Amino acid sequence: MHSTNLTYLVARGLIASAVVVVCLFSSERVAQAQDASTPSPQLRRVQRLVDQLRAKLKIAEPVKVTLVPTNRLLMSVEPVKSGEPVKNGAKRNFRLNVEEEFVKGLSDDELRAAVAHELGHVWVFTHHPYLQTEQLANDIAMRLVSRDALVHLYDRVWSRRGTKGDLALFLGPQAQTQPQAGLAPSDAHRP
């Protein structure tokens, strides 16, 4: 009887230990899942800006930000396939894929220019889907940010990639400056 009680106590102790281990493991998994579902500060920063600028451009379609470890374009937007065809009056969803390390290094002005550019693509897609160009996306972006902000952003992107592009292809020709007051147009450019 003594050995039966001992066996019973050992078995009961093992079961209790197993329950504690399972509970600890389960609570750790729940904590990890909660951490994964809590948006990072960078994700919240970009999503908040996307929502603000979307409203200014009157883009009705939702755009969800996703942070990714790498994106060869650094930031890119794409329509999300829902599996069902988009019917008259239905909204198409879009996803903005943002390389996490890239966005961490952007100032607020640079981020605003980058998001404005990507939302320019969404605007073009929803209004003129067959006219998708970088220059047209930038024309829409310049409703929200200055040309200089986009120039600065392109310089930042190109320096990160170790390349250089032609700004005129992406932003169109630079607007001519107005002649100074009191000078004839031919005198305005003389030193």
Image (spheres, rainbow, N blue to C red):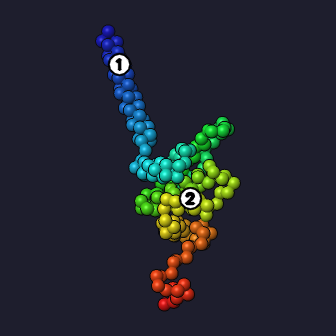
Residue that badge 1 annotates: 12
Specify which label sits upstream in the sequence, 1 or 2. 1
Q: Amino acid at mark 1?
A: Arg
Residue that badge 2 annotates: 140
Q: Nearer the viewer, residue 41 or 77?
A: 77
Mark 2 neighbour density, 10 Å: few (under 14) some (14–19) many (20 or more)? many
Q: Residue at x 42, y 35 (%)?
A: 29
User: How far apart in space, not on screen, are marks 1 and 2 (Cα)?
Assistant: 70 Å
Name of the residue lying farthest toward the bottom:
191
Q: Is residue 80 left or right of residue 30?
A: right
Q: Nearer the viewer, residue 43 or 131?
A: 131
The answer to whether residue 142 is above or below residue 79 is below
Mark 1 neighbour density, 10 Å: few (under 14) some (14–19) many (20 or more)? few
Which of the 4 quarters of the picture holds residue 14? top left
Residue 125 location in percent, x, y?
63, 51
Residue 153 location in percent, x, y?
50, 65
Which of the 4 quarters of the picture holds residue 34? top left
> Which of label 1 and label 2 is nearer to you?
2
* Residue 50 in view (yes/no): no
> Could you tell me which quadrant the N terminus lies in?
top left
> What element does badge 2 sit on?
helix
Residue 103 location in percent, x, y?
46, 57
Q: Nearer the viewer, residue 53 or 35?
A: 53
Residue 132 location in percent, x, y?
65, 57
Q: Nearer the viewer, residue 105 or 11?
A: 105
